[in-house]
Amino acid sequence: MPHDHHNHLSPSGHPYRADNDTDLSYWQTMEIAVRELLIEKGITTAQDVANQIETMDSRTPANGAQVVAHAWSDPVFHAELMRDASAATREMGFDIGPLRLIAVENTPQVHNMIVCTLCSCYPRNLLGLPPDWYKSRAYRSRTVREPRTVLSEFGVTLPDATTVRVHDSTADMRYIVIPNRPEGTDNMSQSDLAKLVTRDSMIGTGLAKRP
């Protein structure tokens, strides 16, 4: 076919990518209608919407890494975080809204993993947008059935004596994993400790980096 560019390169040298100019879904149409209605009634403005989208897009796992590093370094904050993670993270300037945030801590005896079996509930204010695999049906279903197998596919092998606990997020409740602090980090600053904390370690599919 004349316009079939499959396996061909564009003039720029990159593979052709199919257009995504498809019809709007029901939910996309509803979002546009509600947004335009709110703007028309003066409840919000187009700039307010754009600013909020920009704020949401700016959230990254670096936020959560700061929380973890603070918990590793400050026993008082650590206790507050484990008691009420929502309040503790707000004190650091990370407001997760009305959602309840629960911190679960990895130890040599217990390893925690986060999943959302129904959809893709995720602590976005602390970790940014969820990775595609977190939203996949395979991860959502297999993690609760065979967590050790899933961990091994992420390169994490735990001792048989370590208990693996899987936590299912909901629409009004989120989890963040506090990874086990690596050895040899006693004299590191919080900013340097934060560099050891990865997104996957806060989901439970990875471990903190070694210094």
Image: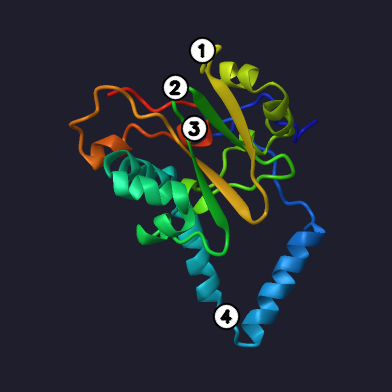
Q: Position of residue 41 (x, y in %)?
A: 65, 87
Check disc 1 and report the residue beneath it.
159
**Which tag is nearer the camera, tag 4 or tag 2?**
2
Q: Residues within 10 Å of mark 4 (few under 14, many from 20)?
A: some
Image disc number at residue 211: none
Circles 1 and 4: CB distance less than 8 Å?
no
Is residue 114 toward the left or the right of residue 125 in the image? right
Q: State which tag comes first along the sequence, 1 or 2.
A: 2
Image disc number at residue 200: 3
Q: State which tag comes first along the sequence, 1 or 4.
A: 4
Q: In terms of depth relative to the viewer, which is nearer, 169 or 83?
A: 83
Q: State which tag comes first along the sequence, 1 or 3.
A: 1
**Which tag is nearer the camera, tag 1 or tag 3?**
1
> Does 57 sit above or below residue 115?
below
> Does 13 sit above or below residue 94?
above
Secondary structure at numbered mark 3? helix
Residue 175 in view in this figure: yes
Q: Residues within 10 Å of mark 1 (few under 14, many from 20)?
A: few
**Which tag is nearer the camera, tag 1 or tag 4?**
1
Residue 205 in view in this figure: no
Identify the image quadrant of residue 171.
bottom right
Circles 1 and 2: CB distance less than 8 Å?
yes
Is residue 36 toward the left or the right of residue 124 in the image? right
Q: Amino acid at mark 1?
A: Pro
Q: In terms of depth relative to the viewer, which is nearer, 146 or 79?
A: 79
Q: Amino acid at mark 3?
A: Asp
In the picture, the quarter occupied by the N terminus is: top right
Measure the alpha-carbon separation of dots 4 and 2: 49 Å
Check disc 2 and report the residue beneath it.
108
Q: Position of residue 124 (x, y in %)?
A: 53, 50
